[in-house]
Image (cartoon, helix red, strand yellow):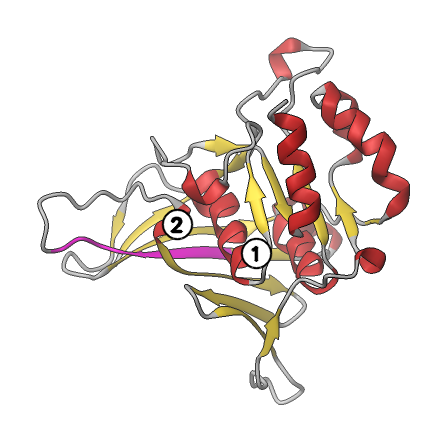
Amino acid sequence: IQVISEESEEIVSMCPDGRYFVYFDPLDGSSNVSHVLPVGFMFGVAKRNLKGTEDNHLRAGKDYIAAGMFVIPTGTFTLALKDAGTWRFHIDETMNFVKPVKMVLPENPKGWELSFNATNRYTFDQRIQDWIVNNERKYSFRYIGALAGDFHRLLGNGGMFMYPAIVNHPDSKKNRPQGKLRLMYEAAVVSFMCREAGGTAIDESGAPILEIQPQKHHQRTALYVGSKPLVEEITKLLKK
């Protein structure tokens, strides 16, 4: 196994002849720890090319064969397998994982939720700001402050999680036109799980997250992930 982590600049070789690359964020939502709010461990897995001449660890999300997350302290483990769906496991009172439940994003928009950092809303692209104004009253609003926790809710209720690029900050030095989330350890992981649950995900240009070819370990991206109708609305908006 070759391990590529958000917390390390170098690839960690657990076994030189291992068959897989593992991409992971060991502690998503670290600012929640002191408040005893949900945090997560997120990971994606891709096969290595042991027979060819190139064994490139910079893999697009479409090349993942699995992705998952533990949400702490909820006692849940969510695992998505390529072309086999997204499954949620719960720990019962005996500390054993119970029979998994297949997660499918609800089609009924009545229970959908929007999740984004409202503090940043006026720093988003004006098109996104306008969309929020026109649509936020249609849906419930929830934001935990940890991608794993927010995405955990999204899988059960449907809707959309957004972490748009920061492009209109009063202090231009704080703009993040490339986005903030890590592509390989965060955005691609939830996008893979979302796809297997019937949803989709894009970046700030409207490009599918799973199609983006990383150019470096810690590449960042904006993220819109969730129920297809909402993400497709944003896609059309961003491509105008």
Residue 146 visible from this viewpoint: no
Residue beneath label 1, please?
A: 194
Secondary structure mostly seen in the magenta stretch: strand
Q: Where is residue 160 in the image (x, y as percent from the top left)?
A: 70, 47
* Residue 126 image-quadrant placement: top right
Q: Nearer the viewer, residue 61 or 171?
A: 61
Q: What residue type is labelled 2?
A: Lys
Compared to residue 33, the image places residue 85 above or below, namely: below
Residue at x 29%, y 39% (from the top left corner): 10
Name the disc covering residue 108, or none: none
Task: Provide the residue span drawn in magenta.
Answer: 42-50
Q: Which amino acid does label 1 sit on?
A: Cys
Q: Horizontally, is 84 left or right of 217 in the view?
A: right
Q: Position of residue 26 (x, y in %)?
A: 48, 53
Residue at x 34%, y 47% (from the top left corner): 4
Q: Nearer the viewer, residue 94 or 195?
A: 195
Q: Position of residue 52 (x, y in %)?
A: 10, 50
Q: Horizontally, is 209 left or right of 154 in the view?
A: left
Residue at x 63%, y 67% (from the top left corner): 104
Quadrant placement of the N terminus: bottom left
Q: Where is residue 144 in the image (x, y as percent from the top left)?
A: 74, 49
Crowding at mark 1 (Cα within 10 Å: few <14, some 14-19, many 20+): many
Compared to residue 222, the image places residue 57 above or below, namely: below
Residue at x 85%, y 39% (from the top left corner): 136
Residue beneath label 2, please?
A: 62
